[in-house]
Amino acid sequence: MANYAYVRVSTREQNIDRQLAALEPYNIPKRNIYCDYRSGKDFERPAYQKMLKRLKSGDLLIVKSIDRLGRNYKEILVQWQNITKNIGADILVLDMELLDTRQKNDNLTGMLVADLVLQVMAYFAQTEREAIRQRQAEGIMAARARGQKLGRKPLPQPEGFEEICLRFRGGEMSVRAAAESLGMSKTTFCRHFQAWEQRNPVPKGRLFGTILL
């Protein structure tokens, strides 16, 4: 019998400290704590899948809350069934006392209440995910309506980038030579050059030729 823990946040910018702090009383070995920086929309997550392969009958899986396990209503119920019935491991959800399958209760009412709580919590996990997506979509639409540019700011160009672009456009350098001088791949250079050229069109009355190889 072994204790395992699963931790999940949607991006690497989010903090997992709160989840790890909640696990401390259980003294789980670090090698048994699995963490994914992935959305909870499905269970195709590398750390979760690795953990699943290690779980055995009699083991205990601990999660901080049901939405850390996932945010897909049907998939949560399927995974719960797989872990508790097929594998034979137990699950403890720290934020919900009733969601502790170690409580082996043959009382029909107790089992019904636990099942209902699981379904309700799984339902709310998915609806919250859908609400987050809706708020994000509304925020994007509002930002576009204000004329705000979205997306990441472009990375600063390497030193000498503009000079290389001018020489390339003038036919003095090949794509390969230009890319190598800037430490880029040919594909990356071409993409950056096209963006630069849109900002710096060829002056009227002047003709440039480029070496393509």
Image (tube, rainbow, N blue to C red):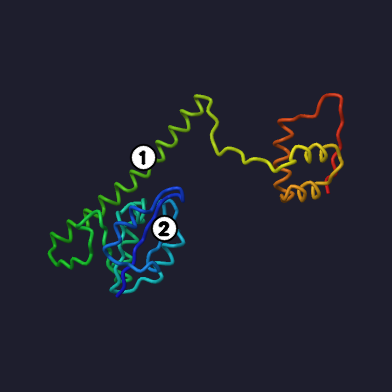
Inter-mark Cα distance, 1 to 2:
20 Å
Lower position in the chain sequence, tag 1 or tag 2: 2
Where residue 168 appears, x then y in whole percent? 82, 41
Where residue 1 appears, x then y in whole percent? 29, 75
Question: Which mark, residue 160?
Answer: none
Q: Which residue is mark 1?
A: 131
Residue at image coords 25%, 57%: 94
Q: Dot 2 lies on which element?
A: loop
Residue at image coords 47%, 30%: 141
Q: Which residue is mark 2?
A: 43
Residue at image coords 43%, 37%: 136
Disc tally is 2
Left or right of 124 in this view: 210:
right
In the depicted view, which residue is nearer to us: 100 or 123?
Answer: 100
Residue 159 appears in which quarter of the rendering?
A: top right
Q: Residues within 10 Å of mark 1 (few under 14, many from 20)?
A: few
Residue 195 appears in which quarter of the rendering?
A: top right
Left or right of 5 in this view: 185:
right
The type of residue carrying mark 1 is Ala
Q: Residues within 10 Å of mark 2 (few under 14, many from 20)?
A: some
Where residue 174 appears, x then y in whole percent? 83, 46
Q: Extreme front residue here?
A: 159
In the depicted view, which residue is nearer to us: 48 or 5?
Answer: 5
Residue at image coords 36%, 71%: 55
Where residue 76 appears, x then y in whole percent? 33, 56
In the depicted view, which residue is nearer to us: 177 or 68?
Answer: 177
Say above or below: 18 vs 62.
Answer: above
Left or right of 131 in this view: 112:
left
Left or right of 166 in this view: 65:
left
Q: Dot 1 lies on which element?
A: helix
- Asked if the residue at tag 2 contacts the one at tag 1, i.e. Cβ–Cβ closer than 8 Å, the answer is no
The type of residue carrying mark 2 is Phe
